[in-house]
Amino acid sequence: MTEPRNRNRTRTGAWPRARTRALLVLPAAALAGLLAACGNGGDGGSEDGTTAPPPAGSTKVTTDLADFRITLSQKTFTPGTYAFVLKNTGHHDHALEIEGPGGENRSDTIGPGESTTFTVTLKDGTYEVYCPVDGHKDQGMKTAITVSGTPAEQPDAPSPTAPGHGY
């Protein structure tokens, strides 16, 4: 008696179902790994709207990032360190970039409902402030700030001539 021939077997002995499963599973696993790598990697933001407190000696600037506008809590700036507390109230991912005499500084990208704190030191001059995500700047998500005047006193910063701080 001869054994019945298995119709699912190919000439090389591979099983088509197993090969098909492997061809489906490998791309799915690669996609999952890619999405995990692009996720929120602990950028200081949170989904519940809480952020870390601004660093000592910095001036807090509440910043609303909406679709497609930026609203800052203050209009005048003097040279110094600022903690921009960003809140994404829109429906798209947003970030904040500040470009000017102090250099180019960019926050982490945050999703809808998320927030983060972005600290930057501003010098005298004019700065362009915009969202660098996917053409949002061209859709009107930009503003400008001018930094001028005497730097604000930083009460938490020690004086370089204070006694007891030298060797």
Image (cartoon, rainbow, N blue to C red):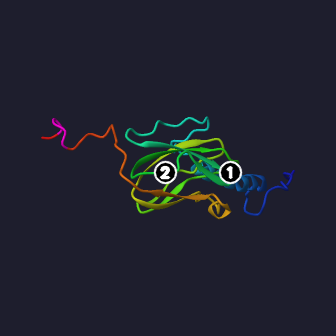
Q: Nearer the viewer, residue 161 or 151?
A: 151
| Residue at image mark 1 | 92
Quadrant location, the C terminus: top left
Seen at 64% across and 51% down, the residue is: 93
Magenta stretch: helix, strand or loop mostly: loop
The label shown at residue 49 is none
Q: Nearer the viewer, residue 44 or 99?
A: 99
Is 157 positioned to the left or the right of 21 in the image?
A: left
Q: Position of residue 76 (x, y in %)?
A: 48, 51
Q: Amino acid at mark 2?
A: Thr
The quadrant in which residue 157 appears is: top left
Callout 2: 10 Å neighbours few (<14), some, many (20+)?
few
Q: Position of residue 120 (x, y in %)?
A: 43, 51
Q: Secondary structure at mark 2?
A: loop
Residue 94 higher or lower than 51, as above or below: below
Q: Position of residue 37 (x, y in %)?
A: 57, 50
| Residue at image mark 2 | 76
Q: Residue furthest front?
A: 149
Seen at 44% across and 43% down, the residue is: 59
Per the rendered image, the range of residues in magenta is 161-165
Q: Nearer the viewer, residue 1 or 133?
A: 133
Q: Which mark's residue is nearer the viewer, 1 or 2? A: 2
Q: Amino acid at mark 1?
A: His
The tag earlier along the polypeptide, 1 or 2, is: 2
